[in-house]
Amino acid sequence: MNESDLIRDLDKEFGACAQEKRKRRVWVSVELNELIDVCRFCYGKGFRHLSTISATDYPSEGMYELTYFLWSYEDKLLVTVKTTISRDKPVIDSVTSIWGESAQIHERELHELFGVKFEGNKDLTPLFLEEWDGPPPFRRDFNWRDYVREKYYDKENEREKPYYL
């Protein structure tokens, strides 16, 4: 399968969701309610490796953009699937039913760092921030300076105050 074949198949199945193509790359934007179907479709077409899931925070637009990077070892082709979710209620269906544990680890990371809840993922326990009691630290409105001041700064040792506080 090449880029044009994949775009043709996606367009036939889901309408015009493919936005762009380059050599060995296809970008797809889907509505939230189509994400699982598009991912399952891609898996059936040989995209057996979920490389990663990333999130971009757009506070002024009130949304996160989630990007799924799917790789086909057989065709040496990368598909990037994008969708958006509400920042106020960041809930999305998990893709663990498609990619299993490899999806679980990526979803746990986004849950911990952005506060995205993946429905259907049975293990959203922290990966890095085991004793974290603050808001999700990768949200753009997270003020890390205030957090460091409150959590770690000792006013009695003014001379040791870091330059960034």
Image (spheres, helix red, strand yellow):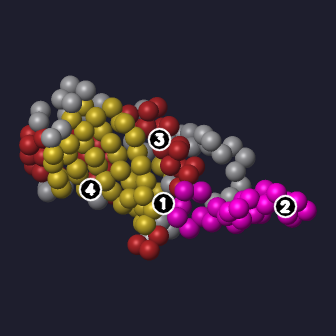
Q: Is residue 63 above or below residue 105?
A: below
Residue 44 appears in the picture as rendered: no
Residue occupying image coordinates x 88% and y 60%: 157
Task: Work out which quarter of the rendered image holds the C terminus and state it.
Answer: bottom right
Q: Is residue 19 in the magenta section?
A: no
Q: Residues within 10 Å of mark 2 (few under 14, many from 20)?
A: few
53 with respect to 14 (left or right): right
Q: Is residue 40 above or below residue 158?
A: above
Residue occupying image coordinates x 29% and y 59%: 31
What's the amino acid at mark 1?
Pro
Q: Earlier in the sequence, mark 1 or mark 3?
A: 1
Could you say which disc has been placed on residue 159 in the image?
2
Q: Earlier in the sequence, mark 3 or mark 4?
A: 4
Could you say which disc has been placed on residue 90 in the image?
1
Extreme residue toward the right, this view: 156
The label nearer to you, 2 versus 1, is 2
Q: Which range of residues does the magenta coloring cover?
A: 136-165
